[in-house]
Image (cartoon, helix red, strand yellow):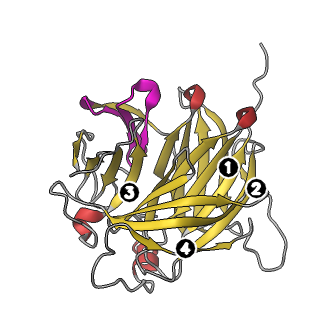
């Protein structure tokens, strides 16, 4: 969810902010909703100036801003707290929320190929092992990671009550899936979750928020401890997605009262060597970035979509940001 720093003051900035009023009952399964998408610029500065990208180790030349949206809905006050997303090959977007909701919509692009809206949106509650809704049950419903497996089954990781559940593609009750045999703090769970097709059709990767510890899991066996991601001081791991060629994209986030929210998008090879990365911070359009999806495009380029969790706060935004990445050329021997 929203553990951005260890300072009590920082936590209060999120926890004490005005929150969106929730309806007394969860949204009915499959309810269609309208999503208003306001285009946001790359930079939120007021005077029209821009700031160079924040590069790390001279990297980030490969990242280009590809558009952004601020998402709201006039139909429900439950379109908040979105923590992870997946973009399916047919253009549908799936996202899970901190309050046990599943959003499904169709991504709309403008003539220039930039995101312009979400259409055909539906909001439904996640369910438990007895196929009953868990929306609004905070200890049980804090969904953080989402992975769609090759056969269409969906994995969702939860924190507070730390676990991974599998939702069958054909419907029916959820069932337990293997999760790391590890200790997780109450609000520092398995934020990062993604399919791991290079390891097998039933394989997935899991990452812990606070220290970047990674596990390799399969539905058919127990999880194995993997490497630990090297993270800058103050950053936490919030999302992961596997790419072709043994590459992986990682989303990190940080917050402090002076600089506000920051995010790092990092692409690594199989040995976790950094291929490229960019830090996004104010005055860029930025909030509490928690979700990542990737679409591989012609010429080896990759479109990344980053999703912000607004913590149900009127002071924050549900942002969907897009960046196009051109992999750096590999020099010859």
Please say whether residue 303 is visible from this viewpoint.
Answer: yes
Q: Secondary structure at mark 3?
A: strand
Q: Residue at x 53, y 57 (%)?
A: 253
- The image shows residue 144, relative to residue 63, as above or below, that is below
Which x, y percent locates residue 139?
23, 66
219 in magenta: yes
Query: What residue is disc 2 on?
Result: 53
Identify the magenta region: 193-222
Mark 3 in CB contact with mark 1 (< 8 angstroms):
no
Q: CA distance from mark 4 to mark 1?
A: 29 Å
Q: 131 or 46: nearer the eye?
A: 131
Single out the mark in the foreground, 3 or 2. 3
Mark 1 in CB contact with mark 2 (< 8 angstroms):
yes
Which x, y percent locates residue 156?
34, 51
Please say whether residue 233 is visible from this viewpoint.
Answer: no
Mark 4 in CB contact with mark 1 (< 8 angstroms):
no
Query: What residue is disc 1 on?
Result: 278
């Amino acid at each position: 969810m929203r553990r951005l720093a260890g300072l009590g003051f920082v936590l209060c900035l999120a926890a004490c902010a005005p929150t969106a009023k929730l309806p007394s009952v969860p949204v009915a399964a499959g309810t269609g909703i309208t999503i208003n998408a306001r285009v946001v610029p790359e930079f939120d500065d007021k005077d029209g100036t821009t700031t160079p990208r924040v590069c790390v180790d001279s990297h980030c030349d490969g990242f280009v801003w590809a558009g952004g949206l601020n998402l709201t809905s006039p139909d429900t006050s439950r379109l908040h707290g979105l923590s992870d997303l997946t973009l399916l090959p047919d253009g549908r977007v799936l996202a899970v929320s901190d309050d046990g909701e599943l959003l499904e919509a169709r991504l709309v692009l403008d003539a220039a190929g930039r995101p312009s809206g979400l259409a055909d949106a539906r909001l439904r509650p996640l369910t438990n092992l007895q196929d009953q809704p868990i929306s609004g049950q905070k200890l049980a419903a804090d969904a953080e990671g989402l992975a769609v497996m090759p056969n269409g089954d969906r994995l969702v990781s939860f924190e507070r009550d730390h676990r991974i559940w599998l939702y069958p593609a054909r419907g029916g009750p959820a069932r337990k899936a293997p999760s790391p045999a590890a200790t997780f703090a109450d609000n520092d769970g398995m934020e990062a979750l993604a399919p791991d097709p290079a390891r097998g059709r039933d394989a997935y990767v899991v990452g812990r928020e606070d220290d970047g510890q990674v596990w390799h899991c399969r539905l058919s066996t127990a999880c194995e401890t993997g490497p630990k991601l090297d993270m800058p001081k103050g950053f936490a791991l919030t999302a992961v997605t596997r790419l072709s060629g043994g590459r992986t994209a990682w989303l990190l986030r940080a917050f402090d009262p002076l600089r506000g929210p920051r995010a790092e998008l990092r692409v690594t090879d199989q040995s976790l060597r950094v291929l490229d990365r960019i830090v996004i911070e104010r005055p860029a359009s930025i909030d509490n970035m928690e979700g990542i999806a990737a679409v591989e495009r012609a010429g080896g380029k990759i479109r990344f979509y980053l999703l912000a969790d607004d913590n149900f706060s009127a002071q924050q935004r549900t942002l969907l940001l897009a960046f196009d990445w051109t992999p750096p050329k590999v020099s010859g021997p």
